Amino acid sequence: MVTSDISKFTLAVREAIVIVLASAALGFSYSFVMKKGLFLPPTPLIAAPQTVVPPEFISYEEAIKLFNEGTVLFADARNQYDYKLGHIPGAVNVPLKEFALHTSPLANTPRDRLIITYCDGEDCNSSIELAQKLSEVGFTKVRMFFGGWNEWQQHNLTTEQ
Amino acid sequence: MKRILDNDFAAMLVRVFLGFVFIVAAVDKAANPNAFAVSIGYYKLIGPDASLVIATVLPWVELLCGIFLVFGYMPRGSSLLVLLMLAVFTAGVISGILRNLDISCGCFSPDPAVGKIGWMKVFENSGLILLSVFSLFSRSERTTVSVLSHSSPEASDNAKKATLS
């Protein structure tokens, strides 16, 4: 009985090794042929239209600079409760979970307006998701301030309630 | 318990169910390794290079295991791998929850808007872990094929006995 169990376990391990090796071969081959993953070319194969800038991260220095210039609109991806507790001055609340363009404060915003999304900070990715959604619905200049609300507060920047 | 482990129908049902779950989970991720690497990166447990290597191989392990489980091909190896993957995924999700990470699971799709991590995900995975343990220890072999079993000591013994009788 014990010998039988050991042999079954040995068989399972051997089968598992075969499957992993076959998967690695398939995975690397697929990525190589399709130019994806590890084999993704350093430059995109299809250039984005010139008017559309894909969402990219900006540091807090860039965020403050744009904030001081006054030409940027901050979009707070957090929920309404967190937004009401405090947010970047002038920011509009666009909770990611309820996102629908026609009901959001951005409904009548020109699509080429520079928008910076943010959420709590490095432990959330709502800002990334919101930036993607905004790009999908036609906004052409979207950036993500990944340091978010936490970094804004750490640098003792002005806040609004 | 012994009777359930010997039951061909239960074993096949569990295998096919687990297989379909893993096939569905794998397809999108296998097709988009870069997006899946980003999902892995959200957990902040490993670096970007390691994430990319894992994202290149892991969905294919899921896919092959899923297909093999559905067709009963190398079922023990597939069940063992499924069990190991689920254990690692669940540990990752629990670690994310404990660190208050507000991230998507990356379980069924690399899309960051799909399936946030939470205790519900841990509960789901626990159910799948139980099924994979059952599949691994199932003694039913009537609906399965293993290419390596002919060389296993047990199979050799059985072959000898069959020859002698």
Image (cartoon, coloured by chain):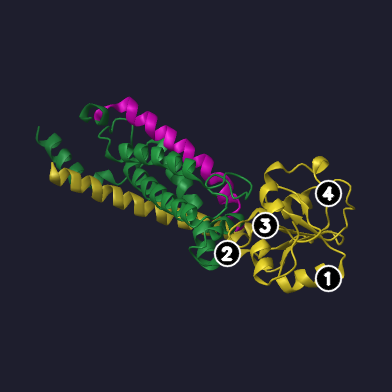
Chain colours: A yellow, B green
- What whole-number distance in Å separates the C-alpha atoms at marks 1 and 4? 21 Å
Same chain for mark 1 and mark 4? The answer is yes
Q: Which mark is residue A119?
A: 3
Marks 1/2 in contact by CB < 8 Å: the verdict is no
Q: Amino acid at mark 3?
A: Cys
The span shown in magenta is B6-34
Q: Nearer the viewer, residue B82 or A104?
A: A104
Q: Which residue occupies 67% across, 48% down?
A: A81
Kindly identify which residue carries mark 2.
A38
Same chain for mark 1 and mark 2? The answer is yes
Marks 1/4 in contact by CB < 8 Å: the verdict is no
Q: Which residue occupies 83% across, 49% down?
A: A106
Q: Number of callouts in the render?
A: 4
Mark sitting earlier along the chain (4/2): 2
Q: Amino acid at mark 1?
A: Asn
Q: Secondary structure at mark 3?
A: loop
Mark sitting earlier along the chain (2/3): 2
